[in-house]
Amino acid sequence: LMASRDAEWLAAFCDKAADNDKAALAGELCALATERFCGPRNAYLTSYYVSRGARESSASEVMLPFLLQALLAAGDEKDVARVVDFVRRSPDEFRVEQCQVPTLKTLVSWSLKRSGSLHPRVAAWLADVRRELEQATAQPPAAPVDWSRPGEVDCNCRFCAQLKSFLANPASEVTRMASGAAMRV
């Protein structure tokens, strides 16, 4: 298992590995990191924390931008392609909107700052994700044919009865109701 802090360190090391000894070590470390990342999945790597209904990022999602920065800095074309292909083949683990788009934003900014251009594999991945998002939003969503929704309210006052009636009506999208908020002081 590689922690995201280790991937962050590897990215920084590879970015500064100019001499031959450091470059060779960077290449070896990148190969090991790629093998672990793309190898059989550890439960920790794919586990998520659910907070208030929203899934937080897995360890793999957090380390992805750092790993790719390390691979790009080390000039490891084969492993860049391997990691990107692995991510694209695992959309449940590496969600497009929550993982791939933020990773691409980080990589594009980093690449342009570092070299003034995008790596061809990153540019192709960016084009694929853009196309996927455009296709997903090409058709406007269809309105539901049934607007009814569960409305289990224990109260039987006239306001709650009106609410229950609205929630049970399949044709009503919206309604106006009095609040019934009169208070005695």
Image (cartoon, helix red, strand yellow):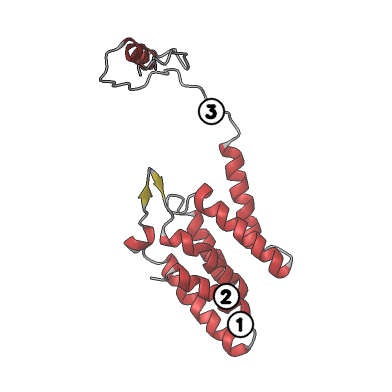
Q: Amino acid at mark 3?
A: Pro
Say which mark, if any, is on residue 12: 2
> Hey, which residue is sitting farthest front in the picture?
185
Residue 69, percent from left and from top: 58, 68
> Hey, which residue is sitting farthest top in the picture?
158
Other-residue count near label 3 (Cα within 10 Å), few / some / many at <14 / 14–19 / ≥20: few
Residue at image location 57% in from the left, 52% down from the top = 101
Which of discs 1 and 2 lies nearer the camera? The answer is 2
The front one of 79 and 162 is 162
Q: Amino acid at mark 1?
A: Ala
Other-residue count near label 2 (Cα within 10 Å), few / some / many at <14 / 14–19 / ≥20: some
Q: On screen, 83 above or below 166?
A: below
Residue 50, percent from left and from top: 36, 49
Where disc 3 sits, the SS reads loop
Picture quadrant of residue 36: bottom left
Q: Amino acid at mark 2?
A: Ala
Residue 114 relative to residue 86: left or right: right
Q: CA distance from mark 1 to mark 2?
A: 9 Å
Residue 91 relative to residue 132: left or right: left
Decide if residue 19 is in sight here: yes
Residue at image location 47% in from the left, 13% down from the top = 176
Residue 84, percent from left and from top: 54, 60
Where disc 1 sits, the SS reads loop
Q: Earlier in the sequence, mark 1 or mark 2?
A: 2
Q: Which residue is mark 3?
A: 141
The front one of 173 and 46 is 173
Q: Earlier in the sequence, mark 1 or mark 3?
A: 1
Where disc 2 sits, the SS reads helix
| Figure quadrant of the N terminus | bottom left
Say which mark, if any, is on residue 17: 1
Residue at image location 63% in from the left, 88% down from the top = 19
